[in-house]
Amino acid sequence: MRVELLHFDGCPNWKVADVRLAEALRMLGRDGSDVEYVRVETAEVADELKFLGSPTIRIDGADPFASGGESVGLACRVYATPGGLAGSPTTAQLLEVLS
């Protein structure tokens, strides 16, 4: 399984996602070093990668949290979580999509 964490430095939420992603992977018996980090630095690269905002998590090239209505670009992304909108999926949500 290929896991990517796409982000840009101007959005702090990717660090929360990174911690939760590592936790979810540990709970599944996987090493967090499996994560490939992709820093998106320009609008052109965001368009090229179809970057839906920071953080974006892709599993085997697919974004399990995409609804189809998101815009591409350098922006902080929000996720629908059981507790309301947040800047990162919960560990439980990540466990679900990684299992």
Image (cartoon, helix red, strand yellow):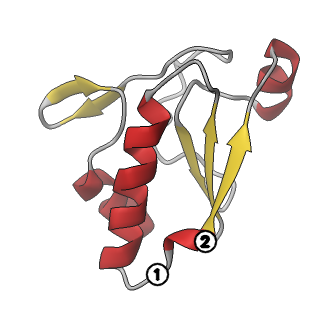
* Most foreground residue, 94 or 65: 94
* Relative to 73, residue 25 above or below: below
Q: Check residue 63 in the rendering and tell me which mark sits there, or answer none.
A: none
Across and down, in percent, residue 69 comes to: 52, 18
**Residue ranking furthest to the left:** 83
- Under tag 2, what secondary structure? helix
- Under tag 1, what secondary structure? loop
Across and down, in percent, residue 56 comes to: 55, 38
> Is mark 1 in CB contact (under 8 Å) with mark 2?
yes
| Quadrant of the image occupied by residue 99 | bottom left
**Please, what is the three-letter code of the amino acid marked with disc 1?**
Arg
Q: Does residue 84 appear left or right of residue 52 in this picture?
A: left
Q: Can you identify the residue that label 2 sits on?
A: 34
Q: Can you identify the residue that label 1 sits on?
A: 30
**Please, what is the three-letter code of the amino acid marked with disc 2?**
Asp
Across and down, in percent, residue 81 comes to: 22, 35
Residue at 61% x, 71% y: name it. 34
**10 Å crowding of disc 2: few (<14), some (14-19), many (20+):** few
* Relative to 58, residue 56 above or below: above
Which part of the image, by quadrant, shows the N terminus?
Answer: bottom right
Count the marks. 2
